[in-house]
Amino acid sequence: EPEIVSGPAAEPECFAPWAAETKFFKFPKKDGPYRIALANGFIANTWRIQMIQTAKAYAAQPDVAAKLKEFKVVSTGEDVPAQISAINNFIDSGYDAIVVNAQNPTAFGPVIKRAKEAGVVLVAFDNILDTEDAINVNVDQKGLGVLWANWLAKHLPEGGKILEVRGVAGTSVDTDRHNGIHETFAATGKKWDVVEVIGKWDDPTAQKATADAIAVHKTFDGITAQGGDTGVVQAMIDAGHPFVPFGGETENGFRKFCAKHASEGLKCSSAGTGPAQVAVAIKTAIAALEGQVVPQSIKLPLAIVEDPNFKEGQDYYPDQSDNFFVGNAFPTCGINFTAQEIMGQSKENQ
Amino acid sequence: MTTAEIQATSPLFRMEGVSKRYGGVRALENAKLDVEAGHIHAILGENGAGKSTLIKIMAGVVAADEGRMLLDGHDITFRSPAAASAAGIACVFQELSLIPDLSVADNIAIANPPRRFGLIDRRAQRAIAEEALARAGAEDIHPRAAVKDLPLSRRQMVEIAKALASKPRILILDEATSALTAGDVAKVFAVLKRLRSEGLALLYISHRMHEIAELADTCTVFRNGRNVASFRAGTRSNSEVVEMMIGREYSNVFPPKPQRAAIAKPPRIECRNLGWGDRLRDVSLSVAEGEVVGLGGLDGQGQRDLLLALFGVLRGTTGSVLIDGAPMTIASPAAARASRSAMALIPEDRKTEGLMLPMTVRENLSFAALDHVARGGIIDRAAEEQLIDEMVQLLAIKTAGLDIPVGALSGGNQQKVVIAKWLMRKPRIVLLNDPTRGIDVGTKQEMYQLLRRLADAGAAILFYSTDYDELIGCCDRVLVLYDGRIVRELEGRDITEHALIASALNVDGGDREGTAA
Amino acid sequence: MSETSDNRVSIRARLPAFLRRADPAVLTAFGCILLLLFLSSLYSSNFLSLNYLLQQLKVASFLGVVAAGVMVVILLGHIDLSVPWVMTTGAMMACAAASFGSVGPVIAIPFGILCGTAFGLLNGFGVAYLRIPSMIVTLATNVVAQGLMVVYTGGFSPQDSAPPAVRWLATGFVIPGLPNAILVWVAISAMMVFLFTRTSFGRAVYGIGNSERAAYLSGIDTRRVVMIAFAISGALSAFGGVLLAGYSSKAAQAMGDAYLLPAIAAVVLGGTSILGGRGSYLGTVAGVILITLLQSILSVMQMPEAGRQIVYGIVIIVMLLLYGRAPPNR
Amino acid sequence: MSEWRYWLNEQRGTLMGLAIFLLMFAVYIANHPAGLTANVAQTAANKGVLFAFVAMAQTLVVITAGIDLSVGMIFILTNCLASWIVVGEPLPTALGVVAVLAAGMVCGAINGLLVIYGRLQPIVATIATGAVYFGLALLLRPFPGGSVNEDLADALTGRLFGVIPSSLVALAAAVVLVWLPFRRSRLGRAAYAAGSSEQAAFMSGVPIRRGKFAAYTLAGLLAAMGGLFLTFFTYTGEAAYASGSGYTLWSIAAVVLGGVSLYGGRGSAVGAIFGAFAARTTGDMLFVFDVDPLWQPLLQGVVLMIAVSIGSLALLRVRNRLDWFQ
Ligand SMILES: Nc1ncnc2c1ncn2[C@@H]1O[C@H](COP(=O)(O)OP(=O)(O)OP(=O)(O)O)[C@@H](O)[C@H]1O
Ligand SMILES: Nc1ncnc2c1ncn2[C@@H]1O[C@H](COP(=O)(O)OP(=O)(O)OP(=O)(O)O)[C@@H](O)[C@H]1O
Ligand SMILES: [Mg+2]
Ligand SMILES: [Mg+2]
């Protein structure tokens, strides 16, 4: 359906192509207002809840709302077939665009085919789709691993003993980040002794695993964790482990710790992509429907904050929840949600 | 009879030196048994004598520790009930072996269902079932009915039909008639006699002496797991046999009844126009303190429902219940138990309704009386211990200890535990739902005396039994039920077997109450 | 058809009295704990350090508190699948209550437990009064609790950092060197032992587990007992969640997910029959320690997740084959 | 009672499941923006069929008064396996399918052996084997990927004659080829008997062990069919723990909705299929009703709660309180 054109995209700073060879799409222009659906999978964690709140907030912004006839969100849980079916249903019900946070990158082949046939714009974000036929709003997961490993290598020029707290086994995000870390370490040519434990992106689990690892291995020279980082730091504090360089995610609680203990040696690199990326995905979908040129694969900037740049009220929020994901600004796209906007969004409903 | 005579010289089936121990309990010790074709062989013995164990070994349900079995003179061992069944041994077990969720037909053909193309042929199965039911004289049972929907007596008939359906050479009945009514018993007896004449070997276990007298050719008595004697039927008197069973003298089964003329005591429990769907209609009765009132009639005429209704188990009853003259609504056994007169119900099936088999004797005994020995929900162990000791003494419960599972006791002693657990509460209204089923004569005798002692101590007793002798021997009055209605009240000398049977069948004066109600 | 074989009897006869009385399952479970520690010490002697062991006990106490509740329900012959989100609810509600003005910190813990109790009562009502199989009511309750927590987190700008009292309860020290969480677990264990062995309620639980019909006909209000048992399970799940929140200094979505199957496995490894009516509390303690140690050791040994799952499964099977078998049929 | 009343009595659970499903599906379709088009039917069928296989598998075990908490993991394991071997030319594909089904049967058989010969309680035994099966799945697929013969996949998830979802046909084939013969066989009867009363079945000389073993093994087979379908539906394999345990737990809900007694001895896999479709429809309701996304999980919980409570209406008819206790 879409025409393959050459770049650049309509808003080149926001819709940055993933790589030099990335194709650009130009969909036939449709008249608004549009019906857009968000097919989410799992919902019961803070990231996803925040993402949905952001999506609603974005869709409610006056200039966006003017372009939308309907914005519908369905969360289908962990089950991939249920999510596929939801997308099928959206296609059959005549939605113009479907935004999806895919439970599994490789499972959507048939549905992508159907969307294409039906002329529905499919935009994937966060957990993207393994395809050239849908638009991906991409986070460089492997690049994140590379970034963390580089951060540690910078602070430990001679190598050292590293604790790596991994995510949920069997997922591509975990694998990509893990590979990024290890390839980068290997490239330094130094001696790295990496102890891997599984934290499942969950604070208590990560904390327990870290505490056990510290009890048995005594000390580490550096730590990298891809989720549950607040728990990891908590375990260090509980065990009296000296603060060491840390490459981790963007939880508010983690950044609070980073800011507080930086002087004691907790030198952090906190990077990731906040749930606000859903807004970029919606923006992309609208742009595509309006017939603008968009890249098939969009590279999202990482929200990176590194020691010593943690700023209160901007990079972290002392009185917000630890579980809150910071890094919700995509200035190039004109998207900047503050914590209050997202979490306090329905405060007036109380 | 010629075949039977020829085979009499070398028995069809023989057991020698068979022993079986359960932990420390010797269930069987060096037992022997000869089973002959064309004979009905009765096995007698008090509760726990090892009768059921013996036949379970024969049927391949339990493996013997030692000893041998011979079929047609050849050594044989059964690895499973299926093997025994294949060898032509069919058994009606004391604990019914029907599968509740399957239909009657499925159950009857369970061991070896007819098959077509490898799958069960339900048409053929149904034919088999209908034939077997007819043979057992239970045509009234629909082969498609689910077993769990049938009353106990019907289930026992199905069980018998199931045993017949396998066309056995040896048929074993372990207290197969204990839940049957007189009418069914007569039908079953006719069948058994016919089978005998067809050359089958039958083993018959029962605690009812008159049944044995009517049926048996040979009798073997067991006591404490050993054979005591084998003799031709009719060569010993009843009391001789009973003495062999219990190992002591036996007399005065029933305690004397008090003179009733003087009784003008107020009713302790009274019900007026009690109704429950079409199962109980307009039942009015009263039981005074010191009185033992029997419930008679064919099985399944509402006697059980009446007891359950009084005990607060049934929903949607109509009419009123008065206790000590005051109207009461009893909505649960807990309420019945807690009422001023401390009602107690000795349930029908001790295994599922009376006891928690894996729990210890101690825990079972005090289970219903915990509120008596607990303060604020916390058990006073000393008080508990004292109550338990009292009861064990009072009822002479035979047990290897208080901390063994109650399931390891013999049937009669289990029943004593059920009764003891209620006596602990010192009930003044006692409802008994056929409590002597499958209990040996010795224990029964103790039980009758106990009932009378309770009554003398001021309790009101309502006693349902399927055994007419008991009603005659124990009760001051008997109310006969038919189709959920009290059709006759017998008192004193009027309580005779003839009167009981006649009114049970509702042949005389059954319409006295009128049918227009 | 229970059958005690002769040689087992004679072996037991030779044991000292207190061991003879103990449940063989419990003894085996404790034996397995020692074996596990021995094997792990071959990998690193740090596994035997007091520090490591205390930490395991601390972490085990969260599971221990949850498993105590699950055990009550399992003894009834039921099961509680609502553990994960009732735990989460307890934790989140305790943290939420903490920010509720000046009374907040005082009512935080009771309020969390209260919310768990409410879900427990819902379960109990479904099981006891509506007579829905527990497996399914508690499953539905779990989904409902999850739904409520999602709504709460999304809609009410959640306060989810653990207040100091909760922190202290889980990680503070009344006795120097001994984390409070362990003391809490010991206290709850003492209460459970008392409940099971010395109260009418405990007897009723065992009785219902063996035969609810017989218990009912014995004049026990079995429905109330079942309902209370589920309420206890809900309360203890929530309390476990509160402790876990204290440990990780905050409450979070899905924090209870990792506790359901281990709690059931711990109870069963401790010799409690999943069919109800049989089991001793000490066994559950053994099971909890065993599971916690096993998980921790596999984690520290850096077994990949696949291997961990396989070893974990096989160890449970082997242990059950050692002592968790039903008696033979004949 | 006349014959059909007995028939009705026997089929009550199944009919109840059918009724619940029809009711929910009717509400769903009535509110669906597209109505009941071939596409919508196909989508609903594909999604339901996967789960129906798992629910059928659970039924077989539940009938024996057991429970299989590893079905979801067998489902995931066979999915991962299929994403390796159900590829290529027709012959290798066919061999792959056979191997996947065989693998499922082996998993089921292991459960059976542990429960029957190991005499372990099914709940815990299958919790443990579920962990093992998931570990194996992770070994096969450390991260999502793989492929499947797409012609076969499209054929089985597409439509016959343009209208009939072929997945439904496959499901019907499984019923006819696996379930009905099992139910009518001596072993199937033994499985029912053992579930209803193991003691009585033993004393009646029923081949309990073989019956139960067959039930567990066939449960593995059906779960593997589900796993195959998952592969056909998604073209890939993924060792997803959460989805494995989700299928396991929801399969229990499905069998209950389908009128299968968790106490064993009663119920039919056909009922469980309806139960599975009904359970799936609870999720679809969220699609057709305009519910705030954050309220969706709660709504689903409430719908499930109501659905499982429907059965307790029968309590109102109970006149003898002893009937409460089964
Ligand atoms: N499964 C068992 N476990 C332990 N002990 C048992 C078991 N079965 C029977 N016994 C014991 O074996 C002895 C013989 O029991 P059995 O059932 O054979 O007696 P019975 O003669 O049939 O008695 P009843 O007339 O009461 O049925 C009893 O003491 C009983 O307690
Ligand atoms: N569960 C059952 N128990 C007892 N009898 C049954 C049962 N089911 C069916 N029957 C009876 O067995 C006979 C065969 O019924 P069944 O339903 O098996 O027929 P069928 O061989 O499947 O043929 P069809 O289904 O074509 O009628 C009928 O007379 C029926 O009433
Ligand atoms: Mg007997
Ligand atoms: Mg038919």
Image (cartoon, helix red, strand yellow):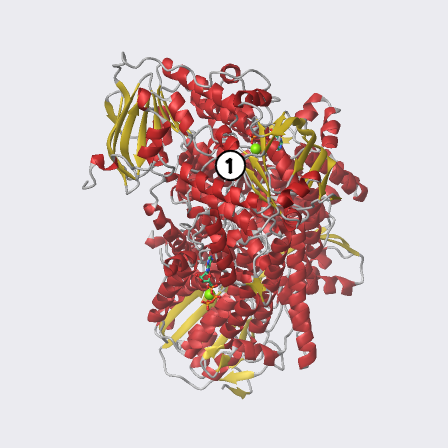
Going by the image, does A151 lie left or right of A32? right
- Mark yes or no: residue A231 visible: no
**Above or below — where is D310 with respect to C46?**
below
Where in the figure is residue D223, as x and y percent of width and height?
59, 63
In this rendered view, identify the residue nearer to me: D69 or A266.
Answer: D69
Distance from mark 1 CB to nearest ligand 1 atom below 8 Å: no
- Mark yes or no: residue A162 visible: yes
In this rendered view, identify the residue nearer to me: D249 or C215.
Answer: C215
Tell me what residue is drawn at x 46 percent, y 80 percent. Answer: A288
Tell me what residue is drawn at x 21 percent, y 34 percent. Answer: B512
Image-quadrant location for residue C48: top right
Where in the figure is residue A196, as x and y percent of width and height?
71, 53
Which quadrant of the rendered structure holds the N terminus of chain B? top right
Where in the figure is residue C186, as x and y percent of width and height?
58, 29
Question: Which residue is tagged 1?
Answer: C209
**Above or below — where is A222 with respect to A63?**
above
**Above or below — where is C186 with respect to C160?**
above
Q: Residue furthest front?
A: B2
Going by the image, does A326 lie left or right of B1? left
**Classed neighbour count for the residue bearing mark 1: other residues with Cα under 10 Å, few (<14), some (14–19), many (≥20):** many
Which element is circle 1 on?
A: helix
Which quadrant of the rendered structure holds the C terminus of chain B? top left
Tell me what residue is drawn at x 63 percent, y 82 percent. Answer: A21
What chain does badge 1 belong to?
C
Q: Amino acid at mark 1?
A: Gly
In this rendered view, identify the residue nearer to me: C94 or B301.
Answer: B301
Where in the figure is residue A193, as x and y percent of width and height?
77, 54
In this rendered view, identify the residue nearer to me: C175 or A101.
Answer: A101
Going by the image, does C250 lie left or right of D214? left
Total number of numbered discs in the rendering: 1
